[in-house]
Amino acid sequence: MWANRAGNRPAGVRPHPYSHPQGGLRWPLEAIGDGWSAEWLSDRPLTGRVELTGRLVVGISWTGSDNPVLVRGRVRRVQLVEQRIEHTGSKLRAVDDTERLTEVESTPHRFWSNWETPSTEDHFQGTGVLVDLDLDDVPAAKMEFVAGAVSVDGPDVWVMDRSNPVLLHIDTGSTPPRIVEYLLPLTIEPPKNQWTRKVHADSDGCWITSRHEVFRCDRAGDGTLTIERVSAEGGSSVVVDGRLFLVGSTYPALHRDRRYGVVRADPDAHPVRIGRLPGLPRRAPVPSAHPGSYRDHPRARTRERASR
């Protein structure tokens, strides 16, 4: 058993209560302590400090927070957790209170072992890893650039950081290549398996797009960079012949909303929007008159007339 005092807040993905199988309502909350965080279900709404008694269990079956608290510390010991597995007719089960710990240098490469192939005669199998984390001896955080989206136009290479609002410009035409780092007035995106921003390079700079917004970056001859948010609505993006196309939803779908959980989202009124060419006064994307056709592009119309 474990007892501690912690602050708590509503879980980000689905803060609304729901009916519990044993009766009553349960509110998904996120408890935050000194160097740790955990998700829990409360039978009444709570905010602020609270004293909790129970067990901390690691699992992947339910994740209430879309932005959990990050924990840093120094790993003091790693132990492999094994349990005795027994046959119960048609299935296997782990026997309670049979855990044994074996100290190892690092975690095994596999995530969970295969119970169908016992590794020893007494049928003990690895079921988890126990890590001793020293929260009072936190290694110094290293500020380093982690490459995310990359785009190239001629000798110009633009690279966006995976999480931080940092943009690199690499001039491969110089010897050696010249690298300039730009700190942008953008949000810090939670690091995920896939980055949330895309970069599209052109002769004057680049576009930075996401599902939330669109930015235009123009680079002057002296290396200075100007950035402008041209749209508070984003979408999937692609650049064709120097022009930015934003593609939205063309059919209704279910999405996970931060406040309401799973909701129905209607298709966009204008599923395709076209960005203005660099150098023009107005760059905000405008709806396409023919979303199913590429003929909105002036170069496409020129090619069509030439072909006739």
Image: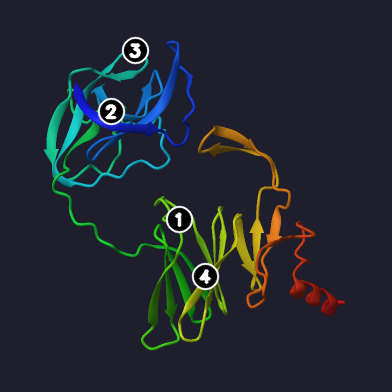
Real-space CA distance between mark 2 and mark 4, rounded to the nearest whole angstrom = 46 Å
Q: Residue at the location (18% across, 45% down)?
A: 106
Residue 174 appears in which quarter of the rendering? bottom left
Of the residues shown, which amino acid type is indicated by label 2? Val
Pinpoint residue 181: horizontal percent, then vertical percent. Answer: 39, 73
Q: Which residue is mark 4?
A: 227
Q: Which residue is mark 3?
A: 89
Q: Say if 219 sits above or below 256 in the image.
A: below
For residue 57, the mark is 2
Of the residues shown, which amino acid type is indicated by label 4? Ile
For mark 1, give the secondary structure: loop
Q: Nearer the viewer, residue 245 or 130?
A: 245
Comparing labels 2 and 4, the label whose residue is closer to the camera: 4
For mark 3, give the secondary structure: loop
Q: Say if 123 sits above or below 206 in the image.
A: above
Q: Are marks 2 and 4 in contact (CB under 8 Å)?
A: no
Of the residues shown, which amino acid type is indicated by label 3? Gly
Q: Nearer the viewer, residue 251 or 42?
A: 42
